[in-house]
């Protein structure tokens, strides 16, 4: 009798737990810290979780607290986390399609194929590594040249900072080797644009990038998944840009002191980053409440599936938008680009979104319960940032005690691993009963 194979979702969870534990142990070594002694366990655990989940949230000043070895270790952990979640999510997607059966595979081949063959695991690994290496190399060259030629940074430190920022950008993390983040470069197009484009590329996902590069006939030949991801991302980028520009135009704590070009650039960066980037060129703690509310919404949605971004994912959000639109119009089937969306997929999207809402609500209530006197909006912002692995902060994280920081550590882990694990578990747990109960319609609304 063959032993039962471990569930793929369980394998992913255990792998990331092991990575977090390993990273925490290494960060606790005295060589990892710039000062005397070793980092406390809670600080090392929080930082390791943040790096592996590609969040970028931190309770200490990354630039001064960690040594050169610690900075290299953070880059390695971030790279491992980003590469791991990208490949794991893509492979889980292929595995789900393998277990659908013949009819299901035929449907998947029509509706969700991105050209990656079922079971072609080696191809996925090579593709993910190639895309990641190419994007990070380009960003490193541009940022290094800018730091060296414009800001008179010695070539060695400029290269180190350029490579570090490139890893953080593509993996949608937000650690910085500068205490003020990227605020010193708020008006520098050559610094901000490459890093922001890296965040966008990493947040789209390997399957989508592969299909876009593979298809020669343009958007009309894209799969439903790629259409939802690309067009949905463009809509969210436009919403984020317009919201930050309009609502923060005169805010003296954010865009107010900048000129018109600086305002446009900062709005582009800060309208993009909430969807899991982690960098900041303005102080999020100084933003208006209405802007913060929109940022929270963008963080919850996140980026593309099988990408380095977090959140419930763009495809989930816009698929549910199509479901609502179909219901409003009274139509029977949810149709996107002349493709009918399976009811099981709609249920999975609903489950992922509602579980995300419940997780954020539970985390916020827990944080409020153990932390007296914290405003609700600040607690919600920090919890949402942790869940979506956006890595942004309004300053609350650094004010929390070590025990309360563990709540955010748990939220980061659930936000990164939980959405992938839940989605795959739901898809692989599809059962077909041989009977159906009588139908009844309860009152809704």
Image: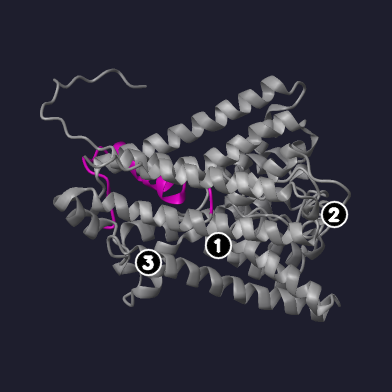
Assign the C terminus to one quadrant of the image.
top left
Residue drawn at x 44%, y 32% as measured from the top left: 354
What percent of the width, then of the height, locates residue 182? 76, 60
Q: Residue 122 has which mark?
A: 3
Q: Is residue 315 magenta?
A: yes
Q: Which residue is mark 1?
A: 200
Q: Furthest-right residue in view?
A: 36
Q: Which residues are magenta?
A: 309-337
Which residue does the image show at 62% across and 28% down from the upper left?
A: 364
The quarter of the displayed image where residue 123 is located:
bottom left
- Disc number lying in front (2 or 1): 2
Lower position in the chain sequence, tag 2 or tag 3? 2
**Mark 2 lies on residue:** 34
Judged from the image, the secondary structure of the residue bearing numbered disc 1 is: helix
Furthest residue in direction left, as rendered: 434
Closer to the N terminus: mark 1 or mark 3?
A: 3
Question: How many neighbours does mark 3 have within 10 angstroms: few (below 14), some (14-19), or many (20 or more)?
Answer: few
Q: Is residue 392 visible?
A: no
- Viewed as shown, does residue 34 lie left or right of 73? right
In space, the residues marked 1 and 3 are separated at their CA atoms by: 25 Å
């Amino acid at each position: 009798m063959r032993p039962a194979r471990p569930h793929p979702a369980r394998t992913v969870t255990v792998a990331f737990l092991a990575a977090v534990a390993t990273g925490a142990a290494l960060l606790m070594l005295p060589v990892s810290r710039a000062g005397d002694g070793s980092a406390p366990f809670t600080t090392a655990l929080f930082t390791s979780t943040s790096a592996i989940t590609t969040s970028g949230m931190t309770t200490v000043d990354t630039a001064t607290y960690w040594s050169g070895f610690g900075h290299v270790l953070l880059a390695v952990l971030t790279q491992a986390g980003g590469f791991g979640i990208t490949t794991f999510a893509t492979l889980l997607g292929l595995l789900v399609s393998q277990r659908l059966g013949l009819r299901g595979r035929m449907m998947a081949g029509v509706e969700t194929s991105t050209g990656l063959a079922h079971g072609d695991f080696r191809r996925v690994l090579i593709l993910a590594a190639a895309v990641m290496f190419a994007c990070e190399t380009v960003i490193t060259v541009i940022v290094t040249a800018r730091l060296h030629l414009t800001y008179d940074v010695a070539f060695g430190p400029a290269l180190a900072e350029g490579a570090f920022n490139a890893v953080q950008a593509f993996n949608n993390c937000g650690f910085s080797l500068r205490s003020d983040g990227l605020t010193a470069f708020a008006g520098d197009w050559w610094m901000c644009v490459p890093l922001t484009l890296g965040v966008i590329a990493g947040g789209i996902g390997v399957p989508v990038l592969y299909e876009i590069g593979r298809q020669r006939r343009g958007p009309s030949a894209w799969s439903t998944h790629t259409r939802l991801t690309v067009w949905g991302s463009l809509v969210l980028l436009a919403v984020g840009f317009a919201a930050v520009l309009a609502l923060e135009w005169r805010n003296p704590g954010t865009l107010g002191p900048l000129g018109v070009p600086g305002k446009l650039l900062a709005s582009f960066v800060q309208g993009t980053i909430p969807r899991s980037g982690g960098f900041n060129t303005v102080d999020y703690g100084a933003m208006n409440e209405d802007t913060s509310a929109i940022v929270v919404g963008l963080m919850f949605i996140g980026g593309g599936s099988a990408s380095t971004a977090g959140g419930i994912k763009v495809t989930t959000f816009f698929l549910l938008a199509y479901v609502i639109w179909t219901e409003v119009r009274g139509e029977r089937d949810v149709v996107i680009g002349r493709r009918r969306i399976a009811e099981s997929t709609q249920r999975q999207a609903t489950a992922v979104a509602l579980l995300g809402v419940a997780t954020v609500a539970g985390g916020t209530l827990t944080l409020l319960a153990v932390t007296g006197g914290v405003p609700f909006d600040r607690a919600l912002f920090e919890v949402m940032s942790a869940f979506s692995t956006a890595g942004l902060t309004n300053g609350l994280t650094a004010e929390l005690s070590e025990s309360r920081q563990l709540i955010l550590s748990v939220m980061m882990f659930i936000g990164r691993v939980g959405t992938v694990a839940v989605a795959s578990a739901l898809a692989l747990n599809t059962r077909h009963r041989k009977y159906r109960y009588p139908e009844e319609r309860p009152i809704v609304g």
